[in-house]
Image (spheres, rainbow, N blue to C red):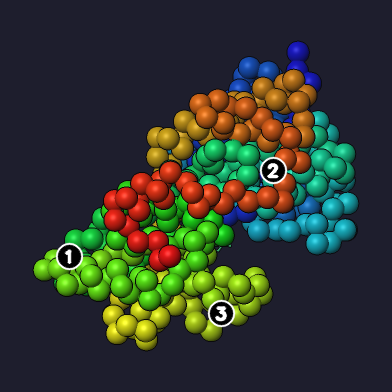
Amino acid sequence: MTATKRFGILTAGGDCPGLNPAIRGICKAAFHEYGMEIIGIHEGYKGLVEGKGRILKPEDFSGIIHTGGTILGTSRERPFKDPIKVDMMIDNYKKWGLDALVVLGGNGSQKRAYWLSKKGLNVIGLPKTIDNDVFGSDMTFGFHTALDVATDAVDRLHTTAHSHRRVLIAEVMGNEAGWLALYGGIAGGADVILIPEIPYDVHLILKHLKTRLDHPEGFSVIVIAEGARSAEKAQFSKKQMRKVKETDGGSGLRLSKALLEAGGIEARVSVLGYLQRGGAPVAYDRVLATQFGTKGAELLARGDYGRMVALKGQDIVSIPLEETAEKTKLVPVDHLAIHSARLAGTCFGD
Ligand code: F6P
């Protein structure tokens, strides 16, 4: 017996490694264990608006656990900006005869999933993103793969920084949250880690770098989150920051300019960008995504709708979509990892 006989599944927002393992997990359990029919919706909410999708069969969701990206495609469609698009989504849900919709997405996508559930649709969310910033889940799939990419990059920067006694900056993604920079910085043994949650003072960074440069092996590696800002810019609105980015570039470039202007230190920048989102998922993400997927199938079977699957400690649980919607899980400034990094001599620019 299953409450859901036919459901639609979509992947929305920025892609990440682990989406295919999650699709595989939920579809295998739903199809083989519960006998559900599945519509794979193309390119996230865009496909739901436009009615573009296809019936998924076992051959579609088999042999994909090791693959990056998403077999369904994704988009940054924001359908709630246009009431007509909202009606179109509801119409297509009905036209396809869906009992439920599964949304694999980050913050923005889970917020839209919640809004759709308020419109009367049966929705279940699975949290994904390299940023690990979905509120209510200790971890999102995608994060560990991106973290390994960032760590590998910092390792590589270390050897060349050492050879030339240079200051090198690695700018990592993470949106408004500092998880990737914090963990990538610690794992790569960065000398300075800058995250959005701790606004920095360039003079304190310079002091740290100069002490290191006095040392015979005086090189430094800085890991900066794309959302990190100086204490002054931390007061800026989102709109003002967009303008700053347009005129002065990303966080890494801005920091390198500030280090030169305020202290005469030349620092070269590597922006890791989309390398962090591409490629095969690491084992951790495959396992987490599979568990999230099969948990999603159980919720569908029980008709336990309006919920997002989440990791709490060691447990795979589910929380009401309402609890996660419109919130962001930032790094707490008293996080134990920050405390530990400080004790190990890392500068956070404060
Ligand atoms: O949410 C994932 C993420 O890669 C963020 O880290 C980054 O800020 C953003 O997406 C980039 O978005 P886009 O794919 O639209 O360039």
Picture quadrant of residue 101 = top right
As drawn, 299 above or below 167: above
Task: Measure the C-alpha gap from mark 2 to mark 1.
Answer: 43 Å
Tags 1 and 3 touching, CB below 8 Å: no
Left-right relation of 119 to 241: right
Name the residue: 66% across, 26% down.
Answer: 297
Indicate the quadrant where residue 223 lies: bottom left
Task: Give amino acid for label 1.
Answer: His
Q: Is residue 153 left or right of residue 323?
A: left
Q: Identify the residue position indicated by label 1 in the image.
A: 162
Q: Residue at 80% x, 47% y: name it.
A: 115
Of the residues shown, which amino acid type is indicated by label 3? Val
Q: Mark 3 points at which residue?
A: 244
Q: How far across and down, in percent of the image, does residue 5 sit? A: 77, 24
Query: Helix, strand, or loop for circle 1?
Result: helix
Residue highlighted by disc 2: 324
Whichever of callouts 1 and 3 sits on the residue coming sooner in the sequence is 1
